[in-house]
Amino acid sequence: MELGEKLKAMRRKEGMTQSQLCEATGLSLSSYKKYELGLRVEVSYIAMQKIAMHPSFKKYTLWLMTDETAPACGQISAE
């Protein structure tokens, strides 16, 4: 699964719109839309940190970065 697809899956799993995710993380809506669409394949470290460190998305961090999960540690996938 590509990064944009993962971001979309996480957002949907949490029941958020793109606007809500951007408001919660402080990301630009136009940039985030490009991430989900795969138009920007490189995401800055700061943007990834804002997503991964948000309380709603921390549980997906390992899966987002490595395609692995660790349920015992609370790390799940959004699939």
Image (spheres, rainbow, N blue to C red):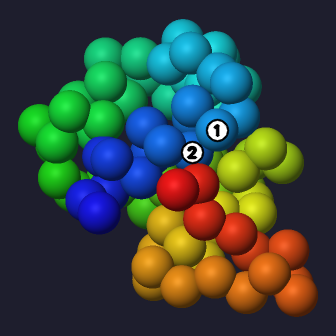
Q: Is residue 1 visible?
A: yes
Q: Are marks 1 and 2 in contact (CB under 8 Å)?
A: yes
Q: Name the residue under label 2.
A: 10
Residue at horizontal 55 percent and vertical 73 percent from the top: 63
- Where is residue 38, by image quadrant? top left
Left or right for 60, reference 7: right
Residue where numbered disc 1 is placed = 13
Q: Which amino acid does label 1 sit on?
A: Lys
Type of the residue with mark 2? Met
Can you say whether 28 is above or below 73 in the image?
above
Q: Which quadrant does the N terminus fall into?
A: bottom left
Front residue of 44 and 71:
71
Q: In this view, does 67 lie to the left or right of 31?
A: right
Compare residues 66 and 69 and report the one nearer the observer: 69
Identified at 17% across, 52% down, the residue is 41
Q: CA gap, disc 1 to disc 2?
A: 5 Å
User: Badge 2, how many Cα within 10 Å: few under 14, some, many 20+?
Assistant: many
Q: In this view, does 79 lie above or below 69?
A: above
SS category of the residue bearing label 1: helix
